[in-house]
């Protein structure tokens, strides 16, 4: 069987290819798993909408009406997803984001709707941030000279956390990158008796161009950027510092966001903390793959699963992704 090789070419002694011979073997030795319960579906719900509305920069993702949101939540539960992350788009915005605190505001209503329908089957999470509710589009309230006022914003986040908790949420996701936000929210929740409401902290959130399509998704009013509060893409060590601070402040899970360009940060955070780590596969990551697939430049389904597996391999226990439902369907085949 073994003919001589050309002179001087030794036969390999060790053959890693042996474990790649069949699909069964490959699956037996796979180091990373991807399963529906590790995935969280981010969804948008628009106040006053009677029909779902398409988001042109995110083909396949919509701004839900309250009723289409419930259908999506049911589907997510049936597919066995780990959770659903709710974003609200209010009809009216103002300088302080009042719509975020109003119990009748769209996000608070949506929380109650979804918890009432699928609360037993699905972890219901809410984005805790002001940017969808402010007319200037920043994640906090502004000082008279137009800077984002960290500590005043904490007061509003504390109230927003209570509104979400009163609406029935399981887990709040503070995403504004204000210093001390996790401690402020934890204290407010505990003082009000909401000791079981968990906090998924957007700990290492970078000032990223990959949030671009999301800005259309939530009709953002932002002019300028968030560089004075979101992190510089150049910094990984600082991302670990942010995660450690959030754990010390009481975060139940910490998150790195975006995911793809920051897999090193995901790994470093995973190695540094002892709580579950999430990563957010953001809008721009979604849109660039969808755009390439629409042109026939990439095998869409394989690329989706490869991307999500890579995020898990880097160390994410939980992945937020707009493909959560689709990935669950692909995994079931
Ligand atoms: C802030 C928030 C943003 C995203 C999630 N929460 C936008 C931002 O910080 O500018 C981005 C999500 C995505 O791009 O998919 N509420």
Image (cartoon, helix red, strand yellow):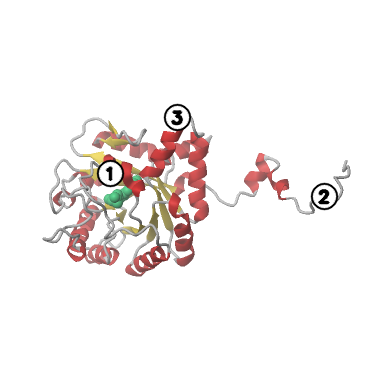
Instruction: Name the N-terminal-most of marks 3 and 1.
Output: 1
Q: Are the residues tagged 3 and 1 within 8 Å (C-beta)? A: no
Answer yes or no: disc 3 within 8 Å of ligand 1.
Answer: no
- Tell me the SS state at disc 2: loop
Task: Mark 1 vs mark 2: give the one in front.
Answer: 2
- Which residue is identified by label 1? 215
Direction from residue 229 to residue 266 in the image, left or right: right
- Which residue is identified by label 2? 9
Q: CA distance from mark 2 to mark 3?
A: 44 Å
Answer yes or no: disc 1 within 8 Å of ligand 1.
Answer: yes
Answer yes or no: disc 2 within 8 Å of ligand 1.
Answer: no
Q: Position of residue 272 (x, y in %)?
A: 46, 66
User: Neighbour class for label 3 at 10 Å: few (<14), some, many (≥20)?
Assistant: few
Instruction: Name the N-terminal-most of marks 1 and 2.
Output: 2
- Tell me the SS state at disc 1: helix
Q: CA distance from mark 1 to mark 2?
A: 58 Å
């Amino acid at each position: 069987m073994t003919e001589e090789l050309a002179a001087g070419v030794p036969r390999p002694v060790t053959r890693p290819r042996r474990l790649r011979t069949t699909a069964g073997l490959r699956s037996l030795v796979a180091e990373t798993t991807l399963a529906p319960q590790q995935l969280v579906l981010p969804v948008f719900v628009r106040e006053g909408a009677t029909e779902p509305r398409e988001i042109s920069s995110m083909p396949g993702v919509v701004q839900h009406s309250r009723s289409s949101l419930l259908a999506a939540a049911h589907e997510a539960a049936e597919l066995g997803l780990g959770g659903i992350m709710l974003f609200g788009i209010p009809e009216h915005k103002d300088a302080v984001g009042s719509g975020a605190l109003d119990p009748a505001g769209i996000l608070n209503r949506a929380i109650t709707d979804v918890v009432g329908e699928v609360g037993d089957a699905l972890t219901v999470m809410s984005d805790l941030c002001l940017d969808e509710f402010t007319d200037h589009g920043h994640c906090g309230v502004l000082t008279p000279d137009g800077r984002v006022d960290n500590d005043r914003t904490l007061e509003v986040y504390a109230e927003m956390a209570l509104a979400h908790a009163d609406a029935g949420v399981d887990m709040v996701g503070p995403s504004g990158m204000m210093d001390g936000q996790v401690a402020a929210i934890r204290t407010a929740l505990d003082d009000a008796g909401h000791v079981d409401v968990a906090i998924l902290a957007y700990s290492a959130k970078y000032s990223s161009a990959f949030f671009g399509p999301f800005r259309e998704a939530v009709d953002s009013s932002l002019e300028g950027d968030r560089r004075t509060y979101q992190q510089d893409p150049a910094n990984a060590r600082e991302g670990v510092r942010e995660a450690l601070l959030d754990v010390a402040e009481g975060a139940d899970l910490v998150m790195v966001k975006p995911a793809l360009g920051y897999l090193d940060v995901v790994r470093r955070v995973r190695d540094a903390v002892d709580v579950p780590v999430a990563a957010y596969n953001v809008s721009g990551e979604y849109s660039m793959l969808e755009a390439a697939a629409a042109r026939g430049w990439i095998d869409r389904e394989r690329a989706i699963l490869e991307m999500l597996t890579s995020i898990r391999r880097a160390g994410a226990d939980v992945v937020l992704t707009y493909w959560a439902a689709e990935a669950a369907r692909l995994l079931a085949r």
